[in-house]
Amino acid sequence: VHQWSGLEARALRKALRKSIRGFAEHLGVAVNTVAKWEKLLSETTPQADSQAILDTVLARAEPAVQERFERLLDSDGLMHRPRRPPVPSLGDHETWAEDLERAMVCLSRQDFTFACTLLDRWLHRVRPGEMDERGQYLYARTLTLFGDTRRLQGTVCDL
C-alpha cells in the first residue's frame, strides 16, 4: 500500500479477522483511532507513524492474510484506483529516515523482503521533482539502498 486510508486499514483488519478493539491492540493504537478510520474510510489518512505500523503488520502477516487483504482491496475497487503521491512533510522525513535505518538493519539480518517493503513504500509514495532538498536526498538514499537490496538478494527489477 503506497498510502493507507481508512479503507485499506479496514481491509487489513478484516483480513486479520480481528474486531476493532483487537485490531487496535494488535497495532498498539487507541480503539478510537481505528474507529475513526472505519467511520471516515477514504476521507481519512492515518498519521505517518500509523502508516509505518500498518505497513509492518501487513508485511509480517501470513500469506493467507495478505491474500485476503488483496481480495478485499480488489472487491472495493481500491487496487486499481489511481492515486497521486503526496509531497512528504517534515514529519514524513523523520519517518522516512527511520525506515531507511530499519531497512539497513534488515539487510544486516538478510531480511530482504521486509527491507524491500520499507524502501518500496517510499519509492512509490513520492515524486522526486516535487520534493525539497532533504526529500530528494532521502529519495536518492532509498533508491540506492533498494538497488543494493536487490543486488544482494540476486534479483533485478524495474521500478
Image (spheres, grey):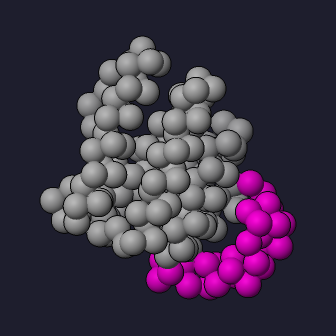
Q: Position of residue 84 (x, y in %)?
A: 28, 66
Q: Quadrant of the C terminus?
A: top left
Q: Viewed as shown, does residue 32 lie left or right of 48?
A: right
Which residue lies at the image location 22% right of the left edge and 61% below the top edge? 133
Q: Nearer the viewer, residue 26 or 15?
A: 26
Of helix, strand and loop, which mostly describes the magenta segment? helix
Q: Residue furthest left?
A: 129
Residue 39 in sight from this viewpoint = yes
Q: Position of residue 65 (x, y in %)?
A: 69, 45
Q: Position of residue 120 (x, y in %)?
A: 41, 44
**Magenta-span inclusion, residue 18:** yes
**Magenta-span inclusion, residue 48:** no
Which residue lies at the image location 63% right of the left edge and 26% below the top edge? 109
When the figure is inspected, residue 126 is found, relative to residue 119, above or below; the finding is below
Residue 115 in sight from this viewpoint = no
Region in magenta: 16-44
Q: Viewed as shown, does residue 127 lie left or right of 88?
A: left
When the figure is inspected, residue 93 is found, relative to residue 149, above or below; the finding is below
Mark count: 0
When the figure is inspected, residue 131 is found, relative to residue 70, above or below; the finding is below
Which residue lies at the image location 35% right of the left edge and 57% below the top edge? 125
- The quarter of the displayed image where residue 11 is located: bottom right
Q: Nearer the viewer, residue 147 or 85?
A: 147
Q: Viewed as shown, does residue 110 lie left or right of 154?
A: right
Which residue lies at the image location 27% right of the left edge and 44% below the top edge? 140
- The quarter of the displayed image where residue 126 is located: bottom left
Q: Position of residue 64 (x, y in %)?
A: 69, 39
